[in-house]
Image: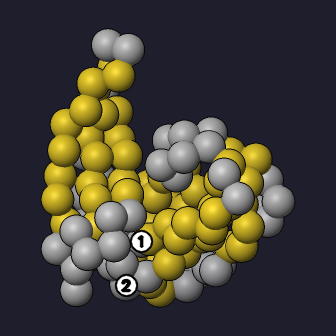
Amino acid sequence: MNAISRYKVTVDGITYHVQVEDETGEVSEVRRSDQPAAEGGASGKTVEVRTHLPGNIYEVLCAEGDRVKKGETVVILEAMKMESPIYATEDGVVKSVEVSKGQTVTAGQVLVTLG
């Protein structure tokens, strides 16, 4: 499994916690500092998988009830004419899919909720 680096970034006075997959450079999670930290799905807590860029949903690769592993692609985002996979940040079961194919999303928007 890929190693993950964590960063704290401040933009326009708002602090974000960012996780980046070291091998691919893909952002796997962006969370505002005023949002509670996501807990692992195995502990029974809810995990929100969010987009790192604004764009359009190119493909949804999971459905409610699916079991996913950390690092598995759950959604493909199209932004700036590029397809970017969005990964599950924890092992868990898909509790809800908040987006659909073709939908426009904003940076930080919840795509999938795991439990």
Q: Is 50 drawn above or below residue 23 in the view shown?
A: above
The N terminus - image quarter: bottom left
| Pointer 1 residue | 88
Q: Is residue 111 visible?
A: yes
| Pointer 2 residue | 69
* Among the two numbered marks 2 and 1 on one chain, the one whose residue lies closer to the N terminus: 2
| Residue at the extreme right | 102
Image coordinates for residue 59, horizontal then vertical, percent:
71, 73
Question: Disc 2 versus disc 1: distance between alpha carbons?
Answer: 7 Å
Image coordinates for residue 109, horizontal then vertical, percent:
56, 44
Q: Secondary structure at mark 1?
A: loop
Q: Secondary structure at mark 2?
A: loop
Image coordinates for residue 11, horizontal then vertical, percent:
35, 22
Q: In front: 20, or 39?
A: 20
In the rendered structure, which amino acid carries the disc numbered 1? Ala
In the rendered structure, which amino acid carries the disc numbered 2? Lys
Q: Are marks 2 and 1 in contact (CB under 8 Å)?
A: yes
Q: Is 103 drawn above or below residue 13 in the view shown?
A: below
Instruction: Name the residue rendered at 28%, 46% in the picture.
Output: 18
Instruction: Name the residue rendered at 76%, 47% in the picture.
Output: 104
Image coordinates for residue 37, horizontal then vertical, percent:
25, 45
Location of residue 19 by image quarter: bottom left
Location of residue 84 by image quarter: bottom right
Q: Residues within 10 Å of mark 2 (few under 14, many from 20)?
A: some
Query: Looking at the rendered structure, which numbered label has been put on residue 9?
Result: none
Q: In front: 39, or 75?
A: 75
